[in-house]
Image (tube, grey):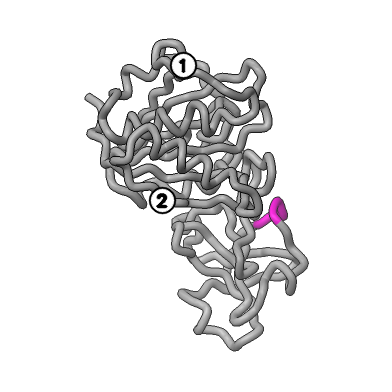
């Protein structure tokens, strides 16, 4: 039994806001159905950066009502033979290219089911080979969110979806640098257990929040995503420590 759609659609892309692509994507969605509420999750994923997009989608888990439809468009392989997927995981739906964009979401779910979006069955006609977000994912999201089609109608179920986990697999590292320069790692807060964080050659004590240290001082803490983060109070940790995404992170006993 699949989760009843919530009527909400979120959008995550690498489109940015310089061009009309975000607006056109929303127009295609509303044209297919004006019932869903559309929420922008993130449109500032770095161009063609699947790993960054995968992190953004992962942050949406449990942040929206059950049955929410999440659209992810970071698609360097658009126009090729790569597949478009409909995935159900965490009681929500995810519409993505089959390139690992949904890998962290699927890897963190107790159960996940993937289906290839069958454009012929759904009577979808592409008008371009370079904008599947508009031509395919937007109308499918609208139909799924409004209940026009159920999840089982998306297409055939598959077992070989690209489940590459770009977020949590591999070494402990910085997986995102946010607007404030805070370093978000792939270490879960539960892993701290009275340890300190080693980052950029510095061993940092763990605090609850920024205000527990003097302005300009670095600290580690458990951020709003439940992950270990590094910040500089009233400052920019990435600039101060000279650290970018991908930098290693370690734990040491206090």
Residue 142 image offset from top left, x and y in percent:
36, 34
Which is nearer the eye, 184 or 191? 184
Report crowding for label 2: few under 14, some 14 to 19, many 20 or more residues within 10 A (C-alpha).
few
Q: Is residue 110 visible?
A: no
Label 2 to label 1, Cα distance in Å?
A: 25 Å
Choose the circle earlier in sequence order: 2 or 1.
Answer: 2
In which quadrant of the rendered view does residue 180 lie?
bottom right
Which is nearer the eye, 147 or 103? 147
Residue 160 image offset from top left, x and y in percent:
52, 17
**Residue depicted at 48% across the width and 24% down the height:** 85
Q: Looking at the picture, does residue 206 appear above or below residue 55?
A: below
Say whether residue 117 is magenta: no
**Residue depicted at 29% across the width and 38% down the height:** 67
Q: Which mark is residue 53?
A: none
Residue 133 image offset from top left, x and y in percent:
53, 33
Q: Secondary structure at mark 2?
A: strand
Q: Looking at the picture, does residue 12 appear above or below residue 131?
A: below
Highlighted magenta segment, given as a residue range:
245-249
**Residue depicted at 49% across the width and 26% down the height:** 136
Q: Main secondary structure of the magenta part?
A: loop
Residue 245 image offset from top left, x and y in percent:
69, 54
Q: Looking at the picture, does residue 229 appear above or below residue 64?
A: below
Judged from this view, the residue extending furthest toward the bottom is: 214
Report crowding for label 1: few under 14, some 14 to 19, many 20 or more residues within 10 A (C-alpha).
some
Apparent side of residue 137 relative to residue 7 in the rendered image (left or right) = right
In which quadrant of the rendered view does residue 184 lie?
bottom right
**Residue depicted at 52% across the width and 78% down the height:** 210
| Residue of label 1 | 119
Q: Which mark is residue 39?
A: 2
């Amino acid at each position: 039994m699949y989760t009843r759609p919530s009527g909400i659609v979120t959008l995550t892309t690498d489109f940015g806001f310089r061009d009309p692509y975000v607006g056109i994507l929303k127009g295609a969605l509303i044209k297919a159905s004006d019932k869903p509420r559309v929420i922008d999750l993130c449109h500032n994923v770095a161009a063609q950066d699947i790993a960054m997009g995968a992190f953004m989608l992962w942050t949406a888990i449990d942040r929206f009502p059950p049955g929410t439809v999440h659209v992810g468009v970071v698609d360097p392989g658009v126009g090729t033979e790569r597949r478009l997927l409909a995935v159900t995981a965490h009681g929500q739906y995810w519409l993505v290219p089959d390139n690992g964009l949904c890998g962290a979401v699927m890897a963190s779910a107790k159960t996940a089911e993937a289906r290839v979006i069958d454009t012929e069955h759904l009577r979808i006609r592409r008008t371009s080979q370079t904008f599947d977000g508009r031509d395919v994912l937007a109308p499918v999201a609208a139909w799924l969110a409004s209940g026009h089609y159920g999840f089982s109608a998306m297409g055939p179920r598959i077992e070989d979806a690209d489940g590459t986990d770009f977020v949590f697999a591999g070494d402990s590292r910085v997986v995102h640098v946010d607007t404030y320069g805070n370093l978000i790692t792939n270490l879960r807060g539960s892993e701290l257990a009275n340890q300190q964080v080693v980052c950029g050659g510095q061993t940092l004590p763990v605090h609850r929040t920024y205000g527990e240290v003097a302005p300009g001082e670095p600290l580690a803490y458990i951020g709003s995503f439940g992950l270990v983060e590094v910040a500089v109070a009233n400052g920019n940790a990435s600039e101060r420590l000279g650290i970018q995404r991908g930098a290693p992170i370690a734990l040491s006993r206090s």
